Amino acid sequence: MKHQKVGTVALVVRYEGDAPTLLETFSDDREIAILETAVNEGEASPLDIIHAMRARQAKEDEEFGDYVEELLCQPFVRPEIQEHGIQWLKSKIRIEQYQKCEGEATHVIAAYAFKLFIEDPDRVDFLLAGPSAKVRIRVFNLSVAASKERARAA
């Protein structure tokens, strides 16, 4: 029997009064690990850390893409270098298509998981399972993180 990988979707919530608000969702394991560390350390703005990391990565990707494009526009580039550049561009397009599909799936899963969380706010780490897939849901409450930060500052 094939062992299936369990993906993770993280919900980031904040309570405004008695009702939780879904702020953002994540499915990237690296981002979830960074978020978890920031929340556990009582970081005041854990989402800002992830947004800054994404911005740096996007800038690096754009700079490399510009380099490849400039390289491909050179008239005397060896054919094998051109082929590598074209393969990189094709790969980048496939990755972007995959990320778009993954983002759409994450949104659907997160919406359902958030409904379950509203029904039972103690469910902060649980599995959603179907016939062919399992997804671990983790809920990060920024209201609790902010309380830790205030307590640490006092």
Image (cartoon, rainbow, N blue to C red):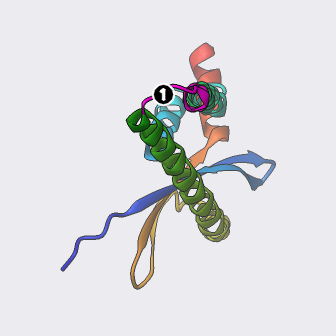
Q: Does residue 147 appear in the picture of this structure?
A: no
Q: How many marks?
A: 1
Q: Does residue 133 appear in the picture of this structure?
A: yes
Q: Position of residue 36 (x, y in %)?
A: 48, 38
Q: Position of residue 145 (x, y in %)?
A: 60, 34
Which residue: 56% across, 32% down?
Answer: 72
Which residue: 59% across, 63% down?
Answer: 101
Which quarter of the figure has residue 146?
Answer: top right
**Does the magenta portion include 63?**
no
Which quarter of the figure has residue 19?
Answer: bottom right
Q: Residues within 10 Å of mark 1 (few under 14, many from 20)?
A: few
Q: Residue furthest front?
A: 76
**Does the magenta portion include 71?**
yes
Q: Position of residue 52 (x, y in %)?
A: 63, 26
Residue type of the residue flagged with mark 1: Val
Residue corresponding to mark 1:
77
Magenta residues (range): 67-78
Q: Nearer the viewer, residue 116 or 90?
A: 90
